[in-house]
Amino acid sequence: MNGDDQQIVPGLSVSTSGQATVDPSIADVLFDLAIKLEETTTLPVDVQHVVAALVLSAPLKEPESAERRYRLSRAV
């Protein structure tokens, strides 16, 4: 994870370009969760679905707009 990435949960981060990165240390947990959800719901669930749900549920930081930066710089 670099300085611009946002951590969603420990071991899962999203870059400013929207690329999710999963640390190998949580791979088994995500896999087990996918299996448990699949058994419970009888729907097809894989690790990508679990990661997507976590990312979509997180309040992602939005980049500051150029217009807002301009207004703030003019206020100084």
Image (tube, rainbow, N blue to C red):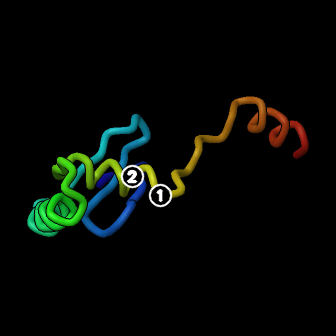
Q: Amino acid at mark 1?
A: Ala
> How packed is label 1: few (under 14 Cα within 10 Å), some, or many (20 or more)?
few
Quadrant holding the N terminus: bottom left
Q: Which residue is label 2 attached to?
A: 55
Q: Which residue is label 1 attached to?
A: 58
Q: Whole-percent x and y of residue 12? A: 29, 59
Q: Nearer the viewer, residue 45 or 47?
A: 45
Q: Badges 1 and 2: C-beta atoms under 8 Å apart?
A: yes
Please indicate, yes or no, whether residue 48 appears anywhere in the rendered image: yes
* Residue at the farthest right position: 75
In the image, residue 74 sits, relative to residue 28, either above or below, namely above
In the image, residue 31 sits, relative to residue 64, either above or below, namely below
At a point 44% along the width and 50% down the height, the residue shown is 56
> How packed is label 2: few (under 14 Cα within 10 Å), some, or many (20 or more)?
some
At a point 46% along the width and 56% down the height, the residue shown is 57
Q: Whole-percent x and y of residue 71? A: 84, 36
Q: Secondary structure at mark 2?
A: helix
Could you tell whether 50 is left or right of 57 in the image? left
Q: Secondary structure at mark 1?
A: loop
Q: Nearer the viewer, residue 39 or 50?
A: 39
At a point 88% along the width and 46% down the height, the residue shown is 76
At a point 51% along the width and 51% down the height, the residue shown is 60
The alpha-carbon separation of the residues under discs 1 and 2 comes to 5 Å
* Residue at the farthest front position: 42
Please indicate, yes or no, whether residue 25 appears anywhere in the rendered image: no
